[in-house]
Amino acid sequence: MDKYAGRLLADRYRLPQTPSDEFEFVESRAFDTASGQEVLVRQVPLPEVVDAELVDGPGRHGGAAGAGRGAGADRATRTPDDPVVRRAVEAATAAAALPDHPRLDQVFDVFVQGDGLWIVSELVPARPLAALLAEERLGPYRAAEVAADLLAALRIVHAHGWTHRNVTARTVLICDDGRAVLTGLAAGAAEEVLCGYDPLPAPDIPDTFAAHPRKGISGPEPGPGSSGRVAMEKPAGWPPGGGGGAPGPGTAGVGGVPAPGPAGAGAGGWPGNDPAGVGRPDNVPRAGAGAPDEPTGAGGWPPA
């Protein structure tokens, strides 16, 4: 495209023509010559370092330079010599490896060229939230919609062990279709490394979206189509009066709850309006017995 006639990054991304040579991009559109698509590039400035100056040597050299500079400094590299800058590239690349999500921007490439660390991401048709707030105030319902989109994005970030410390009105984009997209995770990770912090998540962070069985509960694994509940063992002696055969009146029903007894029994088969205890299974005449056992308590309960 004709408007992209500026600096070429990584032999692939063509920047627009700058007003002057001293102009430095912080964030700009670019043209990907490999895919033919427009992308967004962000520059994370690298800290300046002071090289040693040899006074008695054959030649004097030194001075302030970017941490990524050296022999062939204007050539792109993804494995810079400086260990701090290399860790910054690794952190940004790891942040870019998050799964694609409609509420997160997608990062394509991370490299160092010149005095900057460059992050190439998708070009989202959107405006920063800061630009929108400068024109009008968000209503309560619109603010709630934006907050819901951001929470959905942060849920994915936190699920993979990351902490997004770069949520600002400039890293939140409001798309033309109304949805909010969170950006700046890779750039924030690189900046944290350059400031001496380690933003990488711990290696033992579990995936909170995976179905893990709760510890401390014995039972078979839930099979396909099951409700996911784990069978619990019933304590010894439960249900009361229950044997190994089929449940009778007043014995265990569903989940060990006594089943309804015959007419005259109380609610759930328990003695109620049955003072003689006729509905009790232990008062059924047995072979060789002349009469039911005499009740020992009020209402014929509990059994002797």
Image (cartoon, grey):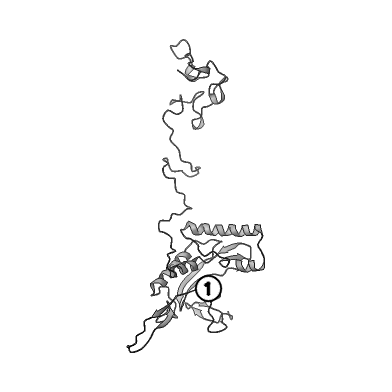
Residue that appears at 50% across and 59% down? 157
- Residue shown at 59%/58% (left/top)? 147
User: Which residue appears at 51% of the width and 81% of the height?
Assistant: 7
Question: Which quarter of the rendering shows the C terminus?
Answer: top left
Work out which residue is located at the far front of the displayed protein and give it: 55
Compare residues 46 and 38 and report the one nearer the observer.
46
| Amino acid type, callout 1 | Val
The answer to whether residue 56 is above or below residue 125 is below
Horizontal and vertical percent for residue 24?
53, 79
| Residue 130 in sight in this render | yes
- The answer to whether residue 260 is visible is no
Residue 213: x percent and y percent? 44, 46
Residue 71 locus on image (x, y percent): 39, 82
Instruction: Tell me which corner region of the image, top left, top right, bottom left or bottom right, holds residue 268.
Output: top right
Question: How many marks overall?
Answer: 1
**SS label for mark 1:** strand
- Above or below: residue 213 compared with residue 267: below
Characterize the local packing of mark 1: few (<14), some (14-19) or many (20 or more) Cα atoms within 10 angstroms: many
Q: Residue furthest top?
A: 290
Disc 1 marks which residue? 41
Classify the position of the N terminus by image quarter.
Answer: bottom right
Identify the residue at horizontal 51%, vertical 58% (top origin).
156
Q: Which of 215 and 249 is in front in this view?
A: 215
The residue positioned farthest toward the bottom in the image shown: 58
* Horizontal side, residue 149 vs residue 85: left or right: right
Image location of residue 177, percent across then percent down: 63, 63
